[in-house]
Image: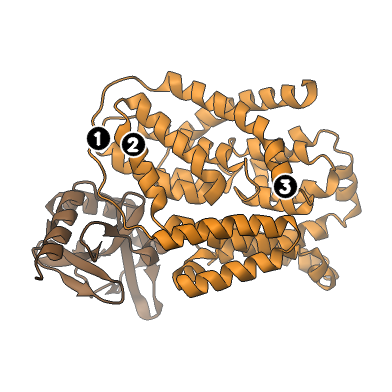
Chain colours: A orange, B brown
Amino acid sequence: MFKKDPFLLILTILLIIFVIWKPSILREVPLFIEYNTLIVLSTFMLITKGIEFSGYLNQVTDKFINRVKTEKGIAFSLIFIELLISPFITNDVSLFLIIPITLSISKRIDLDIEKLIIFEIWAANIGSSLFPIGNPQNIYIYQSFSMSFFDFVWKMVPFEIINATLLIIVIYFSFKKTEIKIKPFVPIVKNRILFIVSIFLFFTSIFLINYKFQIWALIITGITYLIINKRIIYYGINLNLLLIFVFLFILIGGVKEIRVIDGMLSSIRNIFISSILLSQVISNVPTALLFSHYTTSYTQLLYGVNVAGNGTMISSLANLIGIRLGIVSIKRFHLYSIPFLGISTLLLYLYIYYI
Amino acid sequence: MWEKEPTLAIELVKKAKGDFFIGNPFKRAHPHGRVEVKIPLMYNGFVLDLIHFDPIAWSVLPKGIPGVMGGSELLIDLQKIKEEVENSLKDLMVLEGVEFREPEDAWVVPCAFKKLIIAHIRVSADGRALVPDYHATSEMRMNV
């Protein structure tokens, strides 16, 4: 488990050191863990898997790709699909789906595939920001600040428009109008019942979570998948991610009880910029968990941790997945992502403070 | 009576074969020294099957022999193995025979390389769509 997940390994080591240094933390562990976040995370892990295993997302992708006739068209289609599906199935799962498709297209046409994959990683981070369930930090902030689903989406619409527009401009100038011909993919098997049930569970869960019945959302989702497709239960729950959250809750709960650190964090004035900077070093999920205790401005925190994901390779888990899956050069990734982060930070800063 | 769907299934795999590609290999060391090197055979976002590789004899393994004894896990160069299997992919043969697996409700089309069956590709019962190997897909993702 640890061998496959270095982040979990680092957290475990930190936690052991912390417990040795401050054993009293053990008494408070149950109080630090935010159970509702874990419940919501588990619910949407299952639904995401249900939607993915239904095979319908592949059909959507194939339909888009079969219609395009230029290199620019291919890039736009893949990015558009990524923006469209990542809010529903999370940024990392959408990359697991789109990057292999991109690699398979690259076998048929001559395209700067590395550049396209970097843009797909950005699109996954940008698209997933729109919904509370799009990425782990959103699920946490959504739960932690007791926002309604629609409030959350409404807050994120400007973020989405600014970043998606910027991405579209970058893509427009990055690919040529060279004509290409792509032969259609052979279809992947589809499961209509699984798709319909997953969509139904998606909306039912949002409704139940909105009215604070998180546990019922998980129970209904779990039992439904147990009846119609047990594999979803088996493959859907990402235990590593749940453990990461539990360890982070404990660590952050302990850290903020240290007076010096608590004082330092309380004195932070600009959560938007601070969360962007810290995310570049410790990733955006821990940053969201840490800073949520020190701000009431969830918009700044949401914008900060979400835009931060398009920075260094460790600023978002999706970046690491994308880089390894698409075999992207780390140097090239940063060569593109750091300027993109700079421009989108500037635009969002202007929006937050001057509009 | 038993001709239409099997023929469709075989033709479908032949049609898709040109777009098969190799995902990132991963390795697993078992107690008592057995080492498995697994290479995802992928299509359109999913793993179709895992190909096994012998890092000592430097060749793909037939289905049924998932690993070898005595390989030092640390010395295995996964990138080189990936390149080797990628090069072999053009010689992958879709065999003219199928079996039906009732629990999966799918036809299984064997694919061979140098007389060894190295992959089983699942095709839906009507012979019109590929069936991903969800277990292998999850395993591959855990190892990214």
Gap in Å between the C-alphas at discs 3 and 2? 36 Å
Please name the residue that numbered disc 2 is placed on.
A65
Q: Is residue A242 above or below residue A261?
A: below
- The image position of residue A260, as x and y in percent, is 89, 49
Gap in angstroms between the C-alphas marked 3 and 1: 42 Å
Q: Is residue B144 visible?
A: no
Mark 3 vs mark 1: give the one in front.
Answer: 1
- Compare marks 3 and 2 and give the one earlier in the sequence: 2
Callouts 3 and 1 in the same chain = yes
* Left or right of residue A130, residue A18 in this image: right
**Residue at (51, 49) in percent of width and height:** A92
Q: Report whether residue B69 is seen.
A: yes
Query: What x and y, as percent, mark residue B28?
Result: 39, 68
- Type of amino acid at the residue the image marks with label 2: Ile
Report which quarter residue A265 is drawn in. top right
Badge 2 crowding class, 10 Å Cα cut-off, few under 14, some 14 to 19, many 20 or more, is many
Q: Earlier in the sequence, mark 3 or mark 1?
A: 1
